[in-house]
């Protein structure tokens, strides 16, 4: 028997479709110009990366400043794939990264099952094993990928150019997210055992490392097309209004379904009290990894979408100062609130990058970085839990199962059976 959608589900999907349809009409009729179209798409991208951070910090309680680093990984990985297809007319980046992520992911799952039975294995030793296996498989993926790239390139060239570009773009965005997730798993193994403050410092250091690597990506990493500190140009502008709203809707639904499952309850229990959760038999490390990897996957997706909005990437976009943006958004909207995160992300884009940039007097545009923190401080004074607090719209609200009353035993009134 198929399960019917609830009224809140229909209201949510209908409202989401209506909002998208109205915005699409406004953009198509040029009532909203390209500037505001870009601002809205950036707002949706910020909502995705911030939902990922809210899952890590707001719901799981792990203070992380590394979200911007995974955002950068997804951006440059996806951009490199589409750049090679658009400029070099080759699917080599797509094929190699696809094989590398598939093989590495399969190896991580297999090793996780095997190493779970090994007693006394410390996190650094486990990290060394995972890292060694990943490097070996990436070399194999590069060797195999270079051999099958001509066949894949030929197959894509059979399709119309616009269709092939869209296929490469969507796969590139997803692979950027998967790559960020796998790197977050490897990085999280040795540091998730740290306390919340030390974990935050470690993730901030990770973001700084990623920024330095991007500054030297053309020399140190060998990706000449990324051009290091000069910035990467020539990225196809494939991120349309449809794609950002589609991925945002998918991320919201995935997060909502996770939090309403037994896994989500375990994730939240770690935030509430690690000792009590451990006493109840919950594997603390397992659920920290789950939240961290999934949140990083969302960041990678958002990065891939962002890279294809303006067609240009620069390492300064991913410096450690900018890594506080998603943190400010989730605090502003409300820790542990998906609705608040989405609202605050769009407010951040519309106010900081839109209204304040346009309406501040000429020469005072940078004062928006002063006005915005003042608004945040006022909000924290008046509503310490954020604008939405713990409020959620009905579709996203956590619904506890009803308590079933024990069924009463039937009374046997048969005299024959009673006599026997």
Image: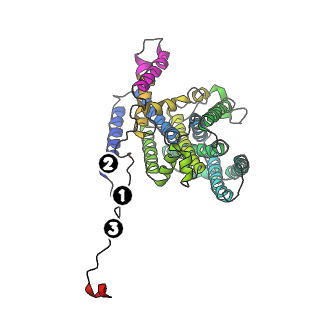
Q: How far across and how far down the image is residue 312, in percent?
A: 56, 30
Q: CA distance from mark 1 to mark 2?
A: 22 Å
Report the residue at 72% width, 46% height from top.
Answer: 124
**Is 3 drawn above or below residue 234 in the view shown?**
below
- Would residue 122 be found to the left or right of residue 244 on screen? right
Which disc is residue 403 wearing? 1
Q: Nearer the viewer, residue 94 or 158?
A: 94
SS state under label 2: helix
Which image quarter: residue 411? bottom left
Tell me if residue 169 can be seen: no
**Dominant SS type (magenta):** helix
What color scheme is it? rainbow
Q: How far across and how far down the image is residue 90, in percent?
A: 62, 44
Q: Which residues are magenta?
A: 355-383
- Would residue 72 be found to the left or right of residue 384 on screen? right
Tell me if residue 311 can be seen: yes
Which disc is residue 8 wearing? 2
| Residue picked out by circle 3 | 407
Q: Is residue 216 magenta?
A: no
Q: CA distance from mark 1 to mark 3?
A: 12 Å
Q: CA distance from mark 2 to mark 3?
A: 31 Å
- First in residue order: circle 1 vs circle 2: 2
- Would residue 368 be found to the left or right of residue 283 on screen? left
- Would residue 120 be found to the left or right of residue 305 on screen? right
Q: Nearer the viewer, residue 136 or 254?
A: 254
């Amino acid at each position: 028997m198929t399960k019917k959608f609830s009224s809140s589900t229909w209201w949510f999907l209908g409202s989401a479709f209506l909002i998208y349809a109205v915005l699409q009409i406004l953009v198509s009729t040029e009532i909203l110009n390209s500037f505001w179209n870009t601002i809205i798409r950036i707002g949706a991208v910020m909502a995705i990366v911030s939902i990922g951070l809210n899952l890590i910090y707001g719901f799981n309680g792990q203070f992380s400043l590394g979200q911007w680093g995974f955002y950068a990984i997804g951006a440059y990985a996806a951009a490199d794939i589409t750049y090679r297809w658009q400029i070099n007319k080759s699917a080599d980046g797509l094929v190699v990264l696809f094989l590398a992520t598939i093989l590495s992911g399969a190896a991580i799952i297999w090793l996780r099952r095997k190493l779970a039975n090994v007693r006394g294995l410390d996190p650094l030793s486990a990290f060394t094993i995972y890292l060694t296996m990943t490097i070996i498989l990436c070399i194999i993926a590069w060797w195999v990928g270079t051999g099958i790239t001509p066949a894949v390139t030929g197959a894509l060239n059979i399709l119309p150019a616009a269709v092939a570009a869209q296929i490469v773009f969507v796969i590139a965005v997803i692979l950027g997210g998967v790559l960020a997730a796998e790197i977050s798993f490897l990085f999280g193994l040795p540091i998730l055992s740290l306390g919340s403050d030390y974990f935050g410092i470690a993730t901030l250091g990770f973001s700084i490392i990623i920024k330095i690597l991007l500054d030297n990506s053309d020399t140190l990493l060998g990706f000449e097309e990324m051009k290091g500190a000069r910035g990467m140009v020539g990225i196809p502008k494939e991120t349309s209004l449809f794609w950002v709203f589609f991925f945002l809707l998918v991320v919201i639904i995935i997060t909502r379904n996770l939090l309403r499952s037994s896994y989500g309850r375990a994730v939240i229990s770690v935030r509430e009290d690690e000792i009590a959760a451990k006493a109840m038999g919950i594997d603390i490390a397992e659920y920290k990894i789950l939240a961290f990897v999934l949140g990083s996957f969302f960041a990678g997706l958002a990065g891939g979408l962002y890279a294809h909005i303006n067609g240009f990437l620069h390492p300064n976009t991913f410096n450690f100062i900018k890594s506080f943006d998603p943190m400010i958004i989730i605090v502003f909207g409300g820790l542990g609130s998906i609705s608040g995160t989405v609202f605050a992300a769009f407010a951040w884009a519309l106010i900081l990058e839109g209204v304040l940039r346009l309406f501040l007097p000429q020469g005072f545009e940078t004062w928006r970085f002063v006005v915005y923190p003042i608004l945040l401080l006022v909000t924290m004074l008046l509503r310490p839990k954020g604008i939405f607090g713990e409020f959620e719209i009905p579709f996203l609200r956590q619904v506890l199962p009803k308590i079933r009353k024990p069924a009463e035993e039937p009374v046997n009134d048969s005299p024959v059976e009673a006599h026997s």
